[in-house]
Image (cartoon, helix red, strand yellow):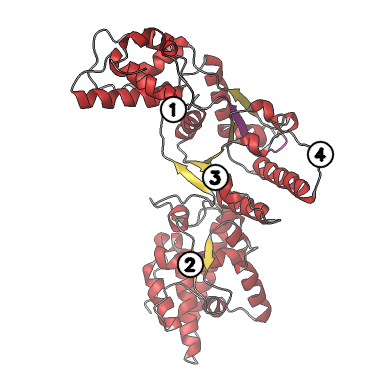
Amino acid sequence: MIEPLVNEESLRRAEWERFELFAHILSLSRQGETPGDQVLARLRELQDEVDRQRKEGDGPLAADLAAHLTPLEYDVLVAITAPEAEPRLGWIFQNLQGSSNPYPTPALLQELLGLDAEGSKHLYAALSEESALRRHRLIRTSGDGAYDELKPEDGVVARLLGRPGADPAPPGTTRVVLEPAWEDLVLPADRETMMREFLHWVRLRDRVFGEWAAPEAGGPVALFSGPSGTGKTLAAAVIATELGWPLFRVDLGLLVSKYIGETEKNLNRLFDAAHGRAMVLQFDEADALFSKRGEVKEARDRYANMEVSHLLARIESHRGPCILTTNLRTNLDAAFVRRFQIVIDFPRPNAEARAKLWSRLLPPGAPKTEDLDLELVGRAVNLSGGSIRNAALHAAFIAADSGKPIGLPEVALAVWRELNKEGRDVSLSELGPLASSLPEGEGK
């Protein structure tokens, strides 16, 4: 083994060099040899540097959740991160284990760290399902045995080392791939102001809770309510884009279980995975969760209330923005609503707002006829923003197929198709002044 030079660069890599020395000492021990004074002196120097880095938060794993781990948990995280951070350590671990596995097993960790019987108990506790490493989805293991493989969870190395890489979705969520700007929203001015106030809760929490010593609180939590298609998800995406954070939609169908206690476990996994990460969580259909509480008639009703209480407690204690959306605010229990920091109602767009939406949602590069009066279109039919988005695209495809510019006939037909999606008898009168532009043969 080549002795590393003591310089600033090696001190910045003290965590990895420390484990390389652990491996060197273990290799000597297996051959019945002992390390020299120079190696032991270097190890003490590295240990002091590692302790300092961890205390001051400037080590290679200082970001994210690493600062909340015990020293032993931190050592485990360093060891399983090492093969990707410093590939030579992966080769060393393979050699020590006599296998093709570059990640250390619990047995190898016990040897590397020189743990006695009592220390090994703490090691296996750090690897258990209840440990911080597992709850925060930092590591995964193929089993509970001494020779089962330990690996970092997907995306952990990229997160902890500040490398570009995929930001894995917390369990039960889906990434929302939207990056809209403020100008993409068509909302009353006061609603946009309330959205910016919600951002204040995220950006200025250190000042208010730290410098100004306000009582600590989690969140913030916002409720976006309004009919379908009024822009609630788009608004959540605007907030995420403004923060520069990913937006994850929570699929409650994957979290809620009919088995007692499983829902709480699934929620814990979600929030443990999201803890300490820069992200926005969006919970759809909040009315299904926080509806007005009825009489408890059977055991399942009591457990359902417990699940809701557990979810609300986790949302409130989570230090990060959560946005709940609902189409039916009147169904929500007022006691729950009072616990949200911001409540924003998303109204159906009026005629002026609908004209703006048509102007923005028709493809800007598409040819349009001179008589395409979008103010008239906006006044004609009371569509939601989502329905206007669908109709605008449908009109564009009709025009693209015919080789004509988008005009009132294409828009009228697209709106007619949108109205007929609702599964009811639709009258031509509902098109208002657009009815005269509907192509011949339609609407009969």
Within-10-Å neighbours for mark 3: few <14, some 14–19, many 20+: some
Residue denoted by label 4: 295
Disc 3 element: loop
Image spot of residue 2 (x, y percent): 36, 77
Q: Do the residues labelled 2 and 4 touch (CB within 8 Å)?
A: no
Image-quadrant location for residue 378: top left
Measure how far apart labels 4 and 1 are at the Cα level: 38 Å
Cα–Cα gap, marks 1 and 2: 49 Å
Residue marked by disc 1: 421
- Quick check: marks 3 and 1 in contact, CB under 8 Å? no
- Can residue 279 be seen by looking at this rendering? no
Image side of residue 402 versus residue 290, left or right: left
Label 2 sits on a secondary structure element that is strand
Where is residue 263? Give x, y as percent. Answer: 65, 52
Question: Residue drawn at (48%, 72%), measured in percent from left and top?
Answer: 19
Q: Give residue 251's mark.
A: 3
Mark earlier in primary sequence (3, 4): 3
Q: Please tell me which residue is depicted at 64% across the width and 34% down the height of the picture.
A: 287
- In the figure, residue 76 lies in which quadrant? bottom right
Question: With 427 as the anchor, is 137 left or right in this view?
Answer: right
Tell me the number on the disc at residue 151: 2
Q: Can residue 167 be seen in this view?
A: yes
Q: What residue type is labelled 3?
A: Asp
Report the magenta residues as a range: 215-226
- Do the CB atoms of the residues marked 4 and 1 lie less than 8 Å apart? no
Q: Mark 3 touching mark 2, by CB under 8 A?
A: no
Q: Position of residue 91 (x, y in %)?
A: 38, 75
Mark with earlier residue (4, 1):
4
Identify the mark nearer the N-term, 2 or 4.
2
Q: How far apart are marks 3 and 4 (CA)?
A: 27 Å
The reply to whether dot 1 and dot 2 touch (C-beta < 8 Å) is no
